[in-house]
Amino acid sequence: MEFNHADLFEGIADAIGDRVAVVCGASRLTYAELDAHANRLAHHLASAGVGPGQHVAIQLYNGVEYVAAILAALKIRAVPINVNYRYVESELLYLYRDSDSVALLYDTEFDDRVASAAPQVPALRHLIAVGGATTVPGAVAYEDALRDQPDTRGFPARSGEDTYIIYTGGTTGMPKGVMWTVHRLLFAFWNPTLPRPDRPEDVVRMAAESGPLVMMPVAPLMHGAAQMATFVAWAMGATLVYTRKFDAAEVWRTIEREKVNSLTITGDAMAIPMADELARGGYDTSSLFAYVSTGAILTGTVRDRIQALLPHAMVLDRFGSTESGSTAAAVAGSSPEKGLRFAPDVENVTVLDDALRPVQPGSGVLGQVARSGYIASGYYNDPEKTARTFPEVDGKRWLLTGDIATVEEDGSIAVYGRGSQTINTGGEKVFPEEVEAVLKGHPGVYDAVVTGIPDERWGNRVAAVVQPTGEKPDPEDLDAHCRKELSGYKVPRAYAFVAEMKRSPAGKADYRWAKRVAEDAAS
């Protein structure tokens, strides 16, 4: 066996084949059944000419088909490519082309978009439609693709150096494909509470000897966090539970029905509607013992509310990125509005200053959070961004995450925000995350995104896009609320109120959109 996700899954399926591997709605497959299902799809892809190193795009909502598509690609040493299902034609064209995908699995709900974009990409030569009849010329129905294909394996040997790509949708630009070797990917996202395996067989043994766990990634599988949560859960021999789309009521119904033990979300965008729904009552959450946010940090007020609603569960924040893996846990009592601090729980995590030297603990010097060791290989089709983000210092390769931070005297890392979003107003730096967290502590604010807009005197001024809880709050009231927690230069000078905040399916803020909305309101 290799430290390859397909090898590991097959070994686990052989060891605990009768255990349920995946549940989504009415679909429920054991490890053995999912393995056989993915084998059929893998054989179909191979028969369609998809070979090692070629890219298979997946434009699906959550479901058994998504999980099978990832496994099928890995089984034949192809590379799964996640596609944001909200993308319109121009964005799809960019991703299809940038990823060099040769095959596409798509939900028939996206027929119109696929029919418009796919014919403009000659390299995209094989289409598989999931979910019923399709109007896209030349597409094969998913059921037909699997029909008459063997459910046995018989695939070529794989390697721990096989490629895995996760397209990450940035907050300011077009998404980039983050490249990993599967070996490094496995260890970068490994559960820090588990012993690190020396041999692939150790992973299989760990899964076989584990107790019955039920784990639920709430984020969509088109987000890297949900994909990695899936593989981590399988290494623990767990049952994975998904909902097709994010709906807070359906999430809680599923938790109650499937007796979910642990779930992962991505920040306030999911936590707030889940808290609202849970507060209405009527759900049995007694099985739940861990509520984890990864990929986006919970504000203190939201975390406190979740904890009050789930007094029997641990509410945790994890720090990391698509490029770095999971690297640290939030220090108890820290939050974006009070000061966000993390304690690294993997090796080779530090803060590097502008000269790419480690920041001394307690010095107060700001730098970027950096990691070496198990990090991504770079960005697909972007050598310039790869060189900037993954510099080599004294023979050691680092990842610069873009998170601005310093190192406290106790060795914890105090994170202020993303450098790319920092607002420079009159020479003072404002980190939007801090202001957003304070705003969301106001009872009249359901959600908030903070950005900088041009100002003749200060260069930029702080502006906030606010989704009210009910009636639109008075800007003067918001101003007074912020001044209790923030220095004057951090307080928003302009507000734009919207009926619904625009965020990615995984909860990430769309800062380009927020800037346009704030500028329009200010004018």
Image (cartoon, rainbow, N blue to C red):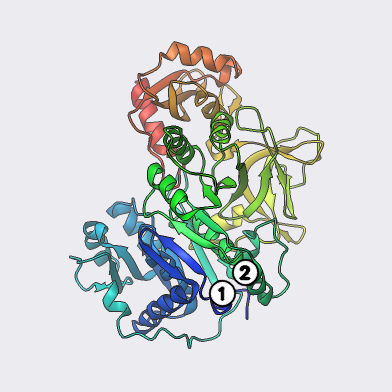
Quarter of the view holding residue 500: top left
| Side of 187 where 298 appears, left or right | left
Q: Quadrant of the C terminus?
A: top left
Question: Which numbered dot is residue 16?
Answer: 1
Task: Kindly identify which residue carries mark 2.
Answer: 207
Q: Is residue 137 above or below residue 409?
A: below
Quarter of the view holding residue 445: top left
| Side of 236 where 342 appears, left or right | right
Asked whether 206 or 384 is in front, the reply is: 206
| Side of 289 where 472 appears, left or right | left
Label total for image: 2
Q: Is residue 440 above or below residue 113?
A: above
Residue 468 horizontal/vertical position (percent)? 39, 24
**Residue 247 visible in the picture:** no
Residue 403 horizontal/vertical position (percent)? 62, 42
Quarter of the view holding residue 111: bottom left
Residue 433 horizontal/vertical position (percent)? 55, 32
The residue sitting at 47% across, 16% down in the picture is 478
Q: Give the amino acid type for the residue marked by disc 1 in the picture.
A: Ile
Within 10 Å of disc 1 (Cα), the crowding (few <14, some 14-19, many 20+) is: some
**Residue 454 visible in the picture:** yes
The residue sitting at 45% across, 37% down in the picture is 278
Whole-Å distance between the Cαs marked 2 and 1?
8 Å
Q: Is residue 397 above or below residue 86?
A: below
Asked whether 26 or 202 is in front, the reply is: 26
Q: Is residue 108 above or below residue 487?
A: below
Question: Which numbered dot is residue 278?
Answer: none
Q: Please say if the residues under marks 2 and 1 sit with CB atoms less than 8 Å apart.
A: yes
Of callouts 2 and 1, the N-terminal one = 1
Q: Secondary structure at mark 1?
A: loop
Q: Give the amino acid type for the residue marked by disc 2 in the picture.
A: Ala
Q: Secondary structure at mark 2?
A: helix
